Image (tube, rainbow, N blue to C red):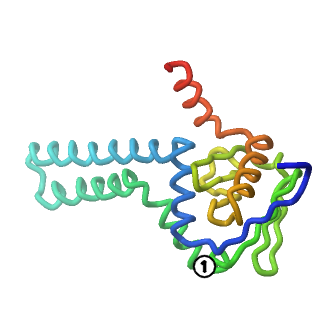
């Protein structure tokens, strides 16, 4: 990016983009794996309870109902469904999340305009970024699945604009620490 010129991205977000961004951030932060581990633990507890109750001659209703509840709860955790249900509910309650958005990227941060709402985020407010070839995420917190900046490559008017936006973000915001650790491990083993 030459100088401090402003770059503009414009698009209409979709629910699928929000879901994809949430999944990517949860993967990067390790939250998705922790949720899967909890789910497996609860499913295992349900199966152990089933075997214990069945072996001890407990009533059939208890032998089936209690473990079944644990297995269902474990499956929900294992599939990491709760955050996605929350996201869908948020989009239903705030349809403006699916309204056209224009993001201006400059040397100091990003400005997002959706309808009559303008939000400004200086680069130093972002805790980390996660990047894949067609999507850049900017998060205000390492732990929260909420991502403040979802910038899809398709929103850029050209490859040059996309390259300048991602370059600016890489210089201004740290890579998510978990990803940085994974990349360091790859580099050491190569």
* Residue 61 horizontal/vertical position (percent): 15, 61
Q: Which of 149 and 188 is in front in this view?
A: 188
Horizontal side of 2 relative to 74 (left or right) equals: right
Residue 119 lies, with reference to residue 3, above or below; the image says below
Residue 190 lies, with reference to residue 135, above or below; the image says above
Q: Mark 1 points at which residue?
A: 93
* Residue 88 horizontal/vertical position (percent): 52, 71
* Residue 45 horizontal/vertical position (percent): 28, 44
For mark 1, does the 10 Å Cα neighbourhood hold few (<14), some (14 to 19), or many (20 or more) residues?
few
Residue 112 lies, with reference to residue 170, above or below; the image says below
Q: Could you tell me which residue is drawn at 69 percent across and 77 percent down? A: 100
Horizontal side of 109 relative to 150 (left or right) equals: right
* Residue 73 horizontal/vertical position (percent): 35, 56
Q: Could you tell me which residue is drawn at 81 percent across and 61 percent down? A: 7
Q: Could you tell me which residue is drawn at 57 percent across and 72 percent down? A: 14
Q: Could you tell me which residue is drawn at 91 percent across and 49 percent down? A: 3
Under tag 1, what secondary structure? helix
Residue 164 lies, with reference to residue 150, above or below; the image says above
Horizontal side of 10 relative to 1 (left or right) equals: left
Q: For residue 111, what is the image quadrant?
A: bottom right
Q: Nearer the viewer, residue 28 or 69?
A: 28
Give the total of numbered labels: 1
């Amino acid at each position: 990016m030459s100088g401090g010129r402003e770059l503009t991205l414009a698009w209409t977000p979709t629910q699928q983009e929000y879901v994809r961004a949430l999944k990517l951030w949860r993967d990067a932060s390790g939250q998705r794996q922790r949720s899967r581990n909890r789910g497996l633990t609860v499913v295992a507890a349900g199966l152990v309870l089933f075997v214990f109750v069945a072996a001890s001659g407990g009533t059939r209703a208890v032998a089936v109902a209690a473990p079944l509840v644990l297995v269902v709860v474990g499956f929900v955790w294992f599939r990491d469904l709760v955050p996605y249900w929350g996201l869908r509910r948020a989009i239903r309650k705030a349809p403006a999340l699916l309204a056209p958005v224009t993001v201006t990227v400059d040397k100091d941060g990003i400005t997002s305009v959706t309808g009559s709402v303008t939000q400004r985020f200086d680069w130093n407010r972002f805790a980390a970024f996660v990047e894949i070839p067609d999507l850049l995420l900017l998060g205000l917190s390492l732990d929260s699945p909420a991502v403040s900046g979802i910038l899809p490559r398709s929103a850029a008017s050209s490859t040059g604009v996309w390259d300048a936006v991602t370059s600016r973000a890489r210089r201004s915001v740290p890579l998510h620490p978990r990803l940085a650790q994974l990349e360091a491990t790859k580099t050491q083993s190569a």
